[in-house]
Image (spheres, coloured by chain):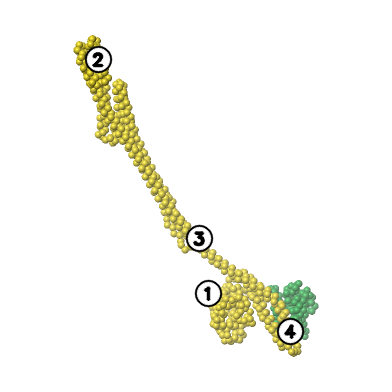
Amino acid sequence: MKIRRKLLIAFSIYMILALIPAVFAYRELSTLRKRLKPVEAASDITSSYLELRKNEKTFLLLKDRDTLQLLKKQIGMLKGGLDDIESEVLREIGAVNYASLREAITAYETGTLKLAENFNTEQLTINKLTDLGRRIEKVLDGSELQTFLVLRRHEKNLMIQRDSSSMDVFRQTSALIKSSPEADLAAYRTSAEKLFSLYQDEKQLENEIRNSASIIQTYTESILQGERQDIDALLKISMNLLLASLVIVIVIGALINARLAATIAAPIREIRKFAERVAGGDFSKTLEVKGSQEFISLADALNLMAVKLKDTVSSLELAIQNLHDKQGQLVEAEKLASLGRIAAGVAHEINNPLAIINEKAGLMQDLLAISSDFEQKKSITAQIEGITGSVNRCRTITHRLLGFARRMDITIEPMNLNEAIRETIAFLKTDILTKAARLDLNLAEDLPEIRSDKIQLEQVFLNLIKNAVDAVAAGGEITITTSRKDEGAVQVFISDNGSGIPKDKLNHIFEPFFTTKGRDKGTGLGLFVSHAIVRKLGSRIQVQSEVGKGTTFTLDIPIKPTLSKEMTA
Amino acid sequence: MNKIKVLIVDDEHDFAATLAERLCLRSYDARIVVNACETLSLIDKIKPDVVLLDLNLQGISGIEILMTLKNVSPEVEVILLTGHMDIARSIEGLRLDSFHYIFKPFDIRELTEKIDAVTAKHGRKQGNEHA
């Protein structure tokens, strides 16, 4: 899967997770909003009730029509408020209690109306009683009047106290009056009795109203409280839901993040390790990454890069190796060239004085030859021969040195290797015959024509064959073999069954002035010169030798020489 | 029969004188000149058959003398005496017609054989005897 898609999915999950609490919160808030209406209604009912009670007190005190009207209106409001939230109230307190509440309200209303009626009757009765009292006062006199006035005082007392003891006192006092008009007195007494009875009823009604009010209060309070509790519960649930959603969002979000980070970090770690390995030159392992498509393509690209890098490094290493080889060859060539210049310089300087010695000695020989015998003539002749002999040796050395210097120039031409060998052997025939050595020639006749410097190669063959002749004992055996080595080279083997070269000397045989033949025989330059020529011609010379068994020189000669300009200059 | 006239041009007097004496002993008319400047006038004067010319002359280059000589008297044979193979090879490169050289030090017989050979072309034969 692609990282982009993963990120998109992770983002979508975050969004959904964030939406869940938001939806919950929205739902809870709208529920709350709905629920707040009944709470307000319940609150209205409660306040209506409180207003009602206040007016009830006023009414009980003033007993006036206005307050009654207000009271009636408030009872209506209470009823209307209950009607508005009837379903909530039913749910809150139940049908039975609701019926009780409605009953209590009805009772309260009825009680209030009765009380109002009672107040009216009471007023009429008080008026009647007062009229009758005044009328009776006018007809009475003397002690009876005094008693009646006491009775009137008891009448006032009854109106204030409204209790049975005041009534009892009034009755006893009224019984004392005898001489008044019978009808009025009786009416007066009846009115007083009626008033007392009204007072009793009033008390009864007030109690009933209070009871109803207390029932209403209980219910309205429980309604309000219930609604408040509902809201509280709702709020608590909302809070818990939000908290839970938040926790879920945080936990799941963190998990998703960790997972996502791991899927990105793990391949990056692998890539880093791979890069470190490659930097350390270890190309053995390829990069394998699991996970996102982007990383897999990156790994493919990196692997390709590593392969190319490996190729580049190996070709560079090869180039450096070649450079080293070339440098070695150049150094070798430069060394040989310097040596050649030095050798030539030395040879030139020595040649002139050597020529003088040679001529002087020669002249002495000439003079001796024409002079008559004298005592020491023979001895002197012998001494001079010693001088000329030494001069000859010196000349051999200087000529070889000069020859070596000269041989640094190469002329490449097509040539037949076998023919060159045959010509060289012809030149050495006398030496071979003198040694009575046997010469075996195994020359491959299908050898291809090669391009090389014939004269220089002949010089090499001459040196090597001459060495072989020197190495073998009388009647020894020398074998010369030519063969095709491979596509680009031919080989020459020159073997003898002579004395062989000790191992400790084998490493030095190509050095200048190194000889195993003894001072009189060798100059120590033959193999040195041969080696230099072979190197110049892009060939190789190798030697194998065992003391007592013989020596074999192997020459690898390229069919087409690869010569650098520096080497032929 | 006249002796073969040989002029040795070499600034090494010791060498030239000894060689001249040896050649005289072998019945050549050998003379020496050690001063390079005198060479050409002397050649003109004595008209040698062969000039033995050392190329390591001081003052004037042996090669210059050689070139002049070849121009003035082409019939005179020149044998270069040299310890330097390089010089011999350089002159070889000049593609001169009659040109011979011999490396120092040499055997006297080598030289006399060469002198006899180059003069034989001109019908001269030195019946000299070797020491």
Location of mark 4 (residue): A364
Residue in view at x 44 percent, y 58 percent: A289
Q: Earlier in the sequence, mark 3 or mark 1?
A: 3
Measure the C-alpha gap from mark 3 to mark 4: 82 Å
- Which amino acid type is shown beneath numbered disc 4? Met
Q: Is residue A536 left or right of residue A15?
A: right
Name the chain under label 3.
A
Residue A15 to residue A360: above or below? above
| Picture quadrant where residue A367 is located | bottom right
Name the chain under label 1.
A
- Which of the labelled discs sits on residue A150, or is there none? 2
- Which amino acid type is shown beneath numbered disc 2? Val
Q: Secondary structure at mark 1?
A: strand
Location of mark 3 (residue): A279
Whether residue A505 is visible: yes
Labels 1 and 4 touching (C-beta < 8 A): no
